[in-house]
Amino acid sequence: MTTTARPPLAHNALGRTASAENAGLTITDHGVTGLLVLRVKPERVELVKAVETVLGVALPGALQSATVDLAVVRWMSPDAWLISLEMTERERIEAALVQALDGHGAVVDVSGGYAHIELSGPSVLEVLKTSTAYDVHPDNFVPGKVVGTTFAKATVLLRALGGGSCEVLVRRSLADYVLLWLDKATTDVGMRYVNNSE
Amino acid sequence: MFLIHCPYCGEDREEEEFHAAGEAHIARPLDPDACSDEEWGNYLYFRRNPRGLHRELWVHVAGCGKYFNIARDTASYQIHGSYRIGERFTWSDAEDSAAP
């Protein structure tokens, strides 16, 4: 199934994109990605095993994420994980997870409920420092680490990527606010917006 | 601003990520129908408000979303420990005489 859903930040591409080749911050908008929230009690070992068979990867522990070809699995809470995958795969995987859980857990499709953006460029660290209360020093915020924290006045899920980049998942209703915040936060270093959702 | 240890995330995080949710360890009466109005009212509305050692319920709203307990001093703001729901916390010997 193909989707025609409008990315949460689509309207912001208009006129807001700094052309600067040397922009300090590049915001890559991944548009609407498939997102599933999986809830299962970790002590139910047989259910966790069944889920891991479907995903092809072990459910990551606290503040960790796991990446496979199919999906990225992020730890949200001791009994909740956020799985991102291709929109075309999500219905198949959702059905498989529901079957694996056998009624003793939950899978909720939250695709379209979040804006999925990636921050990269030389000024990412500085921008993050002005935006979040979390300790984003590379010694602490190592690639693959996932934290739920505050970002300006919004609540986001941050994931450290390699090379100093950072992924931000923010609720759709707050996405516009976060983009405006980033626009302000980068007045002196320059910001570039790249729509990667097509 | 101060740091709070979330026992589920296993990290010290900024206070901004948390919300206080009142007194901890409030037991619901096992048989509400058998309660007097006064007992039920006390359970619903009346809370301790000590100056000093206190056990509180907090929630890591911006992080893992889990409720947990904090044992802290309401006068000095010193946090003596944070622990998961279902666990107990005992003060050190010196503090024990002052604790509830």
Image (spheres, coloured by chain):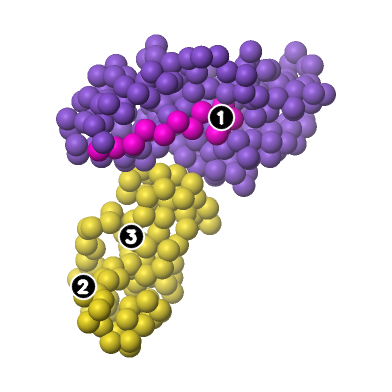
Chain colours: A purple, B yellow
Q: CA distance from mark 3 to mark 2?
A: 22 Å
Magenta residues, as a range?
A104-116
A129 relative to A95, above or below: below
Residue A176's image quarter?
A: top right
Q: Is residue A168 visible?
A: no
The label on residue A112 is 1
Q: CA distance from mark 3 to mark 1?
A: 34 Å
Residue B84's image quarter?
A: bottom left
The subunit letter for the residue under badge 1 reads: A
Q: Which residue is mark 3?
A: B69
Query: Camera-side residue: B5 or A39?
Result: A39
A188 relative to B99, above or below: above
The amino acid marked with disc number 2 is Leu
Q: Residues within 10 Å of mark 2 (few under 14, many from 20)?
A: few
Residue A54's image quarter?
A: top left
Indicate which label's residue lies in the foreground, 3 or 1.
1
